[in-house]
Image: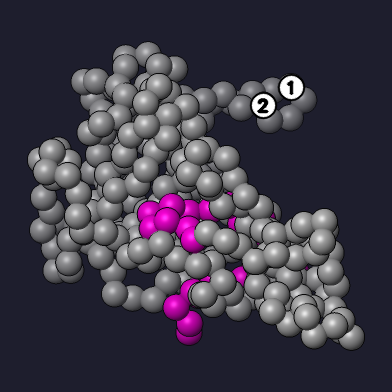
Amino acid sequence: MKKVLIITAAFAVAVLARAAIQPIEGTNVVGFTDIAAPSGANTIITVPFEACMSNGGAGMLSDMVATYSLTANADAALADQLIVLTTNGAEQVYYYYYNHPATGWTAINTEVIVTNGQSRVITPPAANAFEIARGLGFWIKRVASADSTVYVQGQVTSSKQATLIATGLNLVGYGSLQSFDINAIAWTGAFGTNNLSSLYSDRIMVGKGDGTYTTYYYFVKRAGAPSYYDQFTNKWVLSTASGPALPTRNVPAGQGFWYHRRGPGPFTFRPDGE
C-alpha cells in the first residue's frame, strides 16, 4: 500500500513543455502542473492526478514526471534525481531514480544497513513499471546550478481526498488548483497537546521554495487560558519567543510537506470534509 496521497492540478504550461509531455486520453479531464524546483535543493512535489490514464491503464512514474528542463547525466551523482517515499509491506523504503540522457528516469540500487552491521540492497522497480497511484509522494533532488521547473501530468480527480497519516513522518499535501492556506482546510484528527507547548503536538514542515523549511505545530488552547488564544486553537502555528503566531504565507499548488505525527495512532486526513 502506498503511503501518501496528494492531488494537485494546473492547466497552463509552456509550449515547449506541452511538446515534451505526451498527451493522454481518459474519461476524466487531463491536466498539467508546473512546480518550481530551485537549484541544489530538494523540493517536495506531489502525485497530482489519478493513476488511470490511457484507456483506464495505470500511470507509471516514467510517464507522470517529465524530464524536460531537468539535468540528465549517465553518472547518477551528476543528474537530477527523484526520491520516492513508499511502503513495501510493513517497511517504509526510499526508491531512487536519476535522469539518464538515453533512458530517462532510471532506477538506482541503494545499500542500507540492517542489523549487526549487515547490509542489503534495495532495487526499485523500473520507472516504467512503477505504478503511480493515490497514496504516493516523492521529491526531486536537483544538482544543476540554475533554477528550473518540474512538469507533471495526469487525469484530474473529482473525488474527495482521504490520506492516511501514520505515526512518525509522512509526506503529504493537499489537492488544490492554487496556493492554499494550511489553516483554511479541515484537519480533523490532528493532535495538539492541551497546553501552550509544542513539545508533543503534531508538526508539519513546509518548504519555503529555496530548499529550506518552516516548522509549524498544531495548537490546542489550554483549559482556562486567556481568550487571546482562541485565534490559534485547532490551527497550525509558529512557535515564537512571545508565543504562537499564525503562518504568513500559503503553500504553493503542487508542493507537499512533511507531517510528523506525534498523536496517538494514525488518522485519515480529509481536507475536503467527509
Instruction: Report the residue marked by disc 2.
Output: 113
The magenta-colored residue range is 250-274
| Residue 104 in the image, given as x and y percentages of width and height | 26, 28
In the rendered view, how is the structure colored?
A: one colour
Q: CA distance from mark 2 to mark 1?
A: 6 Å
| Residue 219 in the image, given as x and y percentages of width and height | 73, 70
| Residue 58 in the image, given as x and y percentages of width and height | 25, 54
| Residue 262 in the image, given as x and y percentages of width and height | 74, 61
**Callout 2: 10 Å neighbours few (<14), some, many (20+)?**
few
- Location of residue 128 (image quadrant): top left
Q: Classify mark 1: helix, strand or loop.
A: loop
Q: Are marks 2 and 1 in contact (CB under 8 Å)?
A: yes
Residue in the picture at 52% in, 38% down: 211
Residue in the picture at 26% in, 59% down: 10
Q: Image check: 153 left or right of 131?
A: left
Instruction: Report the residue marked by disc 1.
Output: 117
Q: Is residue 226 above or below residue 94?
A: below
Identify the mark at residue 74; answer none if there is no mark. none
Residue 10 seen by the camera: yes
- Location of residue 113 (image quadrant): top right
Q: Is residue 33 inside the magenta stretch? A: no
Q: Classify mark 2: helix, strand or loop.
A: strand
Q: Residue furthest right?
A: 224
Q: Is residue 272 inside the magenta stretch? A: yes
Q: Is residue 257 above or below residue 77?
A: below
Q: Amino acid at mark 1?
A: Gly
Q: Amino acid at mark 2?
A: Ile
Residue 154 seen by the camera: no
Q: Image check: 149 left or right of 269?
A: left
Residue in the picture at 45% in, 32% down: 141
**Callout 1: 10 Å neighbours few (<14), some, many (20+)?**
few
